Image (tube, rainbow, N blue to C red):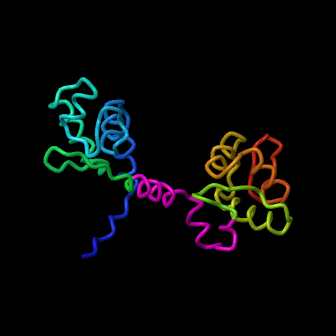
Amino acid sequence: MTSAAPPAAGLGDALAVLLALDHPDRLQLLMAAGGLLPGCPAPCTLDDVARATGRSVREVAETATRMHESGLVRVDGRVLHADTTVFARAAAAVEEAMPVTALLRRRPGVARWFRRGRLLRVPERYEQQAEVAALLVELLPTEVEMSEDEVGAVLGTVGDPAELRRLLVDHRLVERQASRGYRRT
């Protein structure tokens, strides 16, 4: 019998995963469900977690419910199971939402310089730099002057903002305005 692939996550699902981990009790529970909490044998039960953490079984069960809603933990009876594939789906959802991801689909030859929406390094060859710069400039709005901080905020989602700003200026895709802002050429 084959199991269906888990559903793709959206940004809301990714947010739910992060929020589920925003408290030490929930992190402890995830560690327990994954067999990583000292004093909690694998498979771990609600009772085992309560003993190992000094919390009541009721508190542990409430935490497990919150974790279950995010998909991180499954409770079978009183036994906890971790599903760490949720992290990969959440990361894929965030990557998919990054503006550079859509641009990379249109320019697959440039994609080799990127991983998970981040520029690994600026290529050494001028022609390859030009390809990367042509992609990156598409992240900036046209006919709008932007401050250095605004350009840095956009480019910082992809890599080192100062390095990428210089790359765009060197390739004459962005020019510095007299008012000390930047504009696409």
Q: In which quarter of the image is the N terminus?
A: bottom left
Residue drawn at x 14%, y 31% is: 58
| x then y, percent, for residue 50 | 22, 30
Q: Residue at x 37, y 54 (%)?
A: 86
Residue 88 falls within the magenta-colored stretch: yes
Question: Which of the 4 image quarters holds residue 22?
Answer: top left
Q: Does the magenta stretch include residue 7?
A: no
In front here: 59 or 105? 59
Range shown magenta = 87-112
Residue 101 horizontal side relative to residue 91, left or right: right
Quadrant (top left/top right/bottom left/bottom right) for the C terminus: bottom right
Camera-nearest residue between 54 and 11: 54
Residue at the (56%, 63%) spot, across then down: 101
Figure check: 27 above or below 144: above
**In which image quadrant can residue 54 be found?**
top left
**Magenta stretch: dominant secondary structure:** helix
Circle count: 0
